[in-house]
Amino acid sequence: MRGAALGFTELGISRRRVALVHGLILAMVAGSAFCIVTDTEYWPFSQYPMYSNIERPGPFWFLTLWGVPADGGKPEISITDDEYIMPFDWVRLNRAFARLEEMPGHQEKMEAALRDCWARYDRLRASGRHHSPPLQGIRLYRYSWNNVDPSAKLTQPDHRELIAEVMGRDGHTGQ
Amino acid sequence: MSTLRTRWMTFWFAPTPPTDLGVCRFLFFGIFALYYLRHDLSAWGDTSSVFWMPIPLFQYLHLHPLSREALAGLQFVWRAALIGSCVGFATRISTMVAFVLGIYFIGLPHNFGKTHNLDAIVLLTMGVMAVARCGDGWSLDSLLWARPPTRPAERRSGEYTWPIRLAWLLLTSVFFGAGISKLRHSGLAWVFSENLAVVLTQSNAPWGFHIAKHSVLCKLIAALTVLGETSAPLALVSPALRLLIVPGLFFMQLGIWFVMGVNFKSFMVCYLFWVSWRELGLWLTAPLRVGGRHTLIFDGLCGLCNGTVAWIRHLDVMGRVDYHDAVHEWSVISRRFPQLNQAACLNDMHLVTRSGRVLTGFDAYRALAWTLPCGWIALPFLYLPGIGVIGRRVYASIAARRARNGCHVPVHSIVVDRKAAQ
């Protein structure tokens, strides 16, 4: 085949279809190239920037979600696994909270978001997706480390800061 | 210029059988049908509007989260389209619906806080399949509309090549973009700084920490990552580099999943477009073909027989049967199998097994069931007590009706063939 003049009959495809396919190739290449060149993201096209920025040894933090069991004697439980927050996953929910925190009027927004998480926790519990105890409150913390050093494993955070909480069915809000 | 054009056209449109594209369609949609049957996306309908942070595509198309009930209904249609695309039923419509609804369902979660980049390629590949003629092989459509002349594996067209090549292009462009992003944002410091060691430590996965302790190893992995990503497009043009780059990228993602816990499940499904399924199938089934093939002899002037043989040809994915028309190829048949009688072959379908045993009617079908992978499911049933007697009677009844329905035994062809033989 190589080197010979290729006719559409030999290829088993019509000229119109070849034109259509070329249009499709062009659209895909143009979409990807535009995002790569402009360093922007227009889903489903992207420049795929994940992990492209340098992380250096130093301070590090992330958010984490905890439930306060209705039985006051029990310790807080981490509710970042999928069975507590689905259809969210924790990477998405964490990022959503981080974005809410940067928005104007963020306190009300965080409160509404926490209420939504609590309602989801209860729905998933009622549907049998998890068997953790009922809650009397829900809290969002920031765990931070003063210095992430590759030679040492990430263990207990240096600081645990309460970012927002919703307590009781009447929805008392802290922070 | 002409050579370049020829190379371009050969890359995209070199005629190939529909098998590879058909298997890719079957696996691609099958895996996502199973995945999305287990993930209820209608739950996004219950999510508070405080989390709604629309991506540009949803803003532009004015798309919003529907109620849970509406999402559940639409999701039912989407899942049906994914299953239809997998089995190749009404393939063109199924793949189109899967793609259009996929824009909404795959895109919807990205409007709630974070855009994951890992499933965009899935949607784009669905778009490619919606335009492609991917239902011509390994599909119910190809069985339902089977036509006698050729097995699907014998038809060749550029229509079955370009979708696979475009899937390759999409996958390599993802890696190329990721490599360029690293170099643009961080330069070579991405490789030569403590970056990867810190990222692995932050990920807090057990194996990541063990690797993070070895600075040189981290830098070597970082260098290979950037090299592999930026050189990914070379896999399109060089078959030799393809063998190195594509498995390298696959195992790199597997490694990231293992040491950092970043899950590339959806994305990694798209590697199946790099596998030559036809060649793999031929290689795997080579031992089964040792010792020759069965020969199926049928009445080529009978519509019912031709239709049945067309089905069998489609199901004979391992190519273990030869087909001969007792009307038009009797001279060939009589040379190979002098013990056969043409009139008998026109009355009943005959199967000459690899060992030379001659079986007819129901017994021929039962022997074929051992040969066709789809037939393996029926084998236990075909050997139940009494089934042989019933099967032979049913076959005889259908054969008799076939004669009454206008598929008469073409006696004249015997005369013609005998004359030709003389």
Image: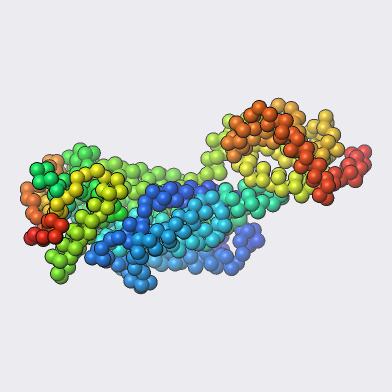
Q: Quadrant of the N terminus of chain A?
A: bottom right
What is the quadrant of the C terminus of chain A in the image? bottom left
Choose between A130 and B226: the one closer to the eye. Answer: A130
Q: Is residue B311 above or below residue B320?
A: below
Residue B273 appears left or right of A129: right
**Count of all numbered marks drawn on residues in the image:** 0
Where residue B228 appears, x then y in whole percent? 34, 49
- Residue at coordinates 69% horizontally, 47% vertically from top-left? B310
Pinpoint residue B218: horizontal percent, then vertical percent.
Answer: 22, 44
Q: Residue at x 64, y 29 (%)?
A: B383
Residue B51 in percent (x, y) is at: 25, 63
Taking the image as shown, residue B176 lies to the left or right of residue A14, namely left
- Name the quadrant containing residue B120: bottom left
B53 or A158, which lies in front?
B53
The answer to whether any part of residue A125 appears in the image is yes
- Of residue A102 and residue B194, the one placed in the foreground of this image is A102
Residue A66 vertical placement versus B94 (above, below): above
* Residue at image location 26% in from the left, 66% down from the top: B49
Q: Residue at x 18, y 58 (%)?
A: A114
Residue B128 showing in the rendered view: no
| B12 versus B359 height, above or below | below
